[in-house]
Every structure is written in structure tokens, then in C-alpha cells.
Image (cartoon, rainbow, N blue to C red):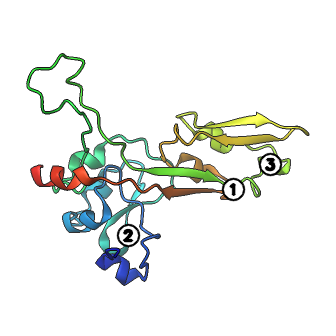
């Protein structure tokens, strides 16, 4: 049996498909709504004004303004651990480590990925447009020339950070952002310890 959160019930989203995009490093939604006090500190800290007040007063991302540069300002002002870096270092329990092994790595800020609808893309319809590729600092979108002089955008999903920069600049809105569901069992134990 699938657990339905209160927010899903109130939104009528019983399958959990329409979750809002939370700020970077947000803990899973079912815990986020319990930990976030809706203090607006992350909203005020976002220089690019990408974090806005969403339904119920909870912060969410608005990628229409641009892409997130993961500056960590929102993370640094969150006092409740609703935004929290989750370590993934396997050697974090060892006392004596070399300086190379002691570097802690973290889960990515979120699991959002871009998707391009090629059927409606201007570039695929004989119009010169490379806005998404030019805005992608991570070089996740490249263009390959096809027969007839058409430049097809190719998205490398592994390189995509889900920053939203490509979404913001697409003149015909063929880029969508989707959240990839990743199980974070360690989040609950990390949350209790932090």
C-alpha cells in the first residue's frame, strides 16, 4: 500500500506525480513539509529570485526566472534541516583516514532532469535556435548536425544537473523538468542525527 501524504490528499494528487520542485538540498517531500517552518529565509536568500512562496507557504522553485547556480545561500540560512546536504562517503565512520579519503561527498542538490520535446523544437523545424545549449553551463546539451542542415539538440542526462537554465530560455517551451525519484533511506537517520 502506498503512503499518501496530507499535501497529496489536499492537492488531489493521490499518485504523487505533481510534487512541486523544492529548493536545492530539500529532504524528501514527506519530511520536508514537517521540517520546513515557512520562515521565508531561503526565499530571501535567493539572489536570483528562483525560490518563491508556493502552496501552503512552502518554498518552491520557479525556473521561469532562470537557472539555479547552486550557490548554497538557501542551504546556509535553513535552520531546521529542511534543506540539508546528505553525505554519501562510505568511509565516514573511520577515525583515521588519509586526507584524500576524508573528503566527504554528498548526494546531488536534487534529482531533477531536463527533457526536450524534439517534435516541437525550433531547431528540429528548420529554425536556428541553440538557446538551451548556450545556456547550459554543464554542457549537457549539444547539437548534432543531421541531414538537411538540421541541428538536433542531444541531452546527456548524466551531465544534466537540472538547474533549469535551459527551461528558462526556451522560446517555445519544449523543455520540461522532471524529478527523478531516488530512494533516500539514509535521510531519515541523517535527519535525526542532525
> Residue 152: where, in percent of width, then height?
76, 42
Task: Residue at 30% x, 55% y: name it.
Answer: 26
Count of marks placed on residues: 3
Of the residues under marks 1 and 2, which one precedes in the sequence?
2
> Residue 14: where, in percent of width, then height?
41, 79
**Of the pair 41 and 153, the residue shown nearer to us:** 153
In the current view of this chain or complex, which residue is farthest to the front? 1
Task: Residue at 29% x, 49% y: name it.
Answer: 74
> Residue 90: where, in percent of width, then height?
23, 33
- Labelled pair 3, 1 in contact (Cβ < 8 Å): no
Direction from residue 15 to residue 144 in the image, left or right: right
Q: How far apart, in angstroms, are the residues tagged by discs 3 and 1?
A: 10 Å
In the rendered image, is residue 63 in sight? no
Of the residues under marks 2 and 3, which one precedes in the sequence?
2
Q: How far apart, in angstroms, are the residues tagged by discs 1 and 2?
A: 27 Å
The residue pinned by badge 2 equals: 54
In the current view of this chain or complex, which residue is farthest to the right? 148
**Of the pair 101 and 136, the residue shown nearer to us:** 101
**Of the pair 145 and 16, the residue shown nearer to us:** 16
Direction from residue 169 to residue 38 in the image, left or right: left
Q: Quarter-wise, where is residue 27 in the image? A: bottom left
Direction from residue 112 to residue 174 in the image, left or right: right
Q: Secondary structure at mark 1?
A: loop
Q: How far apart, in angstroms, are the residues tagged by discs 2 and 3?
A: 35 Å
Check the picture and name the quadrant holding the N terminus: bottom left
Task: Residue at 31% x, 42% y: name it.
Answer: 72
Q: Quarter-wise, where is residue 85 in the image? A: top left
State the mark number for residue 117. Answer: 1
The residue pinned by badge 3 equals: 124
Amino acid at each position: 500500500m502506498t503512503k499518501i501524504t496530507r499535501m497529496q490528499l489536499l492537492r488531489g494528487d493521490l499518485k504523487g506525480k505533481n510534487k512541486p520542485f523544492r529548493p536545492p538540498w530539500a529532504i524528501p517531500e514527506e519530511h520536508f513539509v514537517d521540517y520546513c517552518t515557512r520562515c521565508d529565509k531561503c526565499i530571501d536568500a535567493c539572489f536570483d529570485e528562483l525560490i518563491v512562496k508556493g502552496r501552503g507557504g512552502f518554498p518552491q522553485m520557479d525556473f521561469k526566472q532562470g537557472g539555479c547556480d547552486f550557490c548554497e545561500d538557501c542551504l546556509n540560512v535553513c535552520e531546521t534541516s529542511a534543506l540539508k546536504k546528505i553525505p554519501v562517503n562510505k568511509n565516514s565512520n573511520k577515525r583515521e583516514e588519509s586526507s584524500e579519503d576524508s573528503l566527504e561527498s554528498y548526494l546531488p542538490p536534487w534529482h531533477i532532469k531536463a527533457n526536450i520535446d524534439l517534435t516541437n523544437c525550433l531547431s528540429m523545424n528548420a529554425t536556428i535556435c541553440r538557446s538551451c545549449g548556450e545556456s547550459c553551463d554543464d554542457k549537457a546539451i549539444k547539437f548534432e548536425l543531421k541531414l538537411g542542415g538540421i541541428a538536433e539538440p542531444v541531452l546527456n542526462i548524466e551531465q544534466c544537473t537540472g538547474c533549469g537554465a535551459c527551461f528558462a530560455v526556451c522560446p517555445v517551451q519544449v523543455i520540461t523538468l522532471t524529478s527523478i525519484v531516488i530512494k533516500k533511506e539514509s535521510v531519515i537517520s541523517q535527519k535525526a542525527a542532525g
